[in-house]
Amino acid sequence: MENYDYSSCGAYFITICTQNRQSVLSRIVGGDVLDAPQSEVLEDLSVELLPCGKIAEKYINQLSDFYNGLSVERYVIMPNHIHMLLFVKPTENDIFETELLSEEGASRTSPPTRQHSTVSRFVSTFKRFCNKEYGTNIWQRYYHDHIIRNQTDYEEHINYICENPIRWCYDELYAEDS
């Protein structure tokens, strides 16, 4: 969203895709997704991480611990993309800037640009660390983000992440080779 401060506290739904939608991260196994009732599919379905997916998962977990003001609330590693729900928490700098704002009426610093936001730095660092271990770049240049606006939006995106493997063959990012 233009002119939005992506370092603001709140939740963000992120989708990061592999280059040319190559299915190198995982495989969706079990459950006859097309014919079975959803409850049966859930019990038999699993995401089996491939070597690139295992590396991605390692960095999702490590970077979540590395960034003080950020946590990965939920994620799923699909064959050719990753969905993450990130939560940006208030930091000491946010509290200090809020105090400055209330004392002086205006902050002396402008809000960070999207390129320098907490979310963007996390995604950039995540891709860079993964690529270094892969020995090549597997990611598309850009990523998709959605600012979570309220509790209903949050719950819908949590459900989307949890149910994404079930809907894989219907997904717009589905590729035949997965």
Image (cartoon, rainbow, N blue to C red):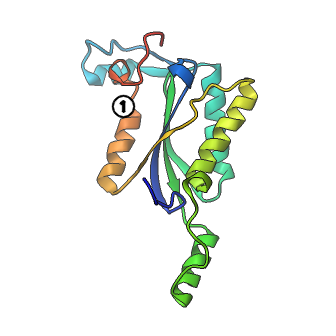
Which residue is rendered at x = 64% and y = 58% of the image? 68
In the picture as drawn, the residue positioned furthest to the front comes out as 2
Give the answer, above or below, for where 141 lies relative to 106: above
**Residue 175: x %, y % from top left:** 44, 15
State left or right for residue 58 relative to residue 76. Answer: right
**Mark 1 Cα shell of 10 Å, populated few (<14), some (14-19), many (≥20):** some
Where residue 63 sits in the image (x, y, percent)?
66, 45
In the displayed structure, 164 sits above or below 32; it is: below
Q: Percent x, y for residue 51?
A: 65, 20
- What residue did someone put label 1 on? 163
Quarter of the image for residue 135 reads top right
Q: Is residue 154 above or below residue 139?
A: below
> What is the count of numbered marks?
1
Which residue is drawn at the image coordinates 34% and 47% (left, top)? 155
User: Tag 1: residue type?
Assistant: Glu
Label 1 secondary element: helix
**Which residue extends farthest top?**
177
Q: Residue furthest bottom?
A: 103
Query: Can residue 61 be seen from the camera position used here?
Result: no
Residue 53 appearing in the image: yes
User: What residue sits 58% from the left and 34% below the top?
Assistant: 141
Q: Nearer the viewer, residue 109 or 169?
A: 109
From the viewer's side, name the closer residue of 64 and 178.
Answer: 178
Left or right of residue 121, residue 87 in this image: left
Q: Position of residue 81 (x, y in %)?
A: 50, 28
Indicate whether 73 appears above or below 105: above
Residue at 50% x, 62% y is 9
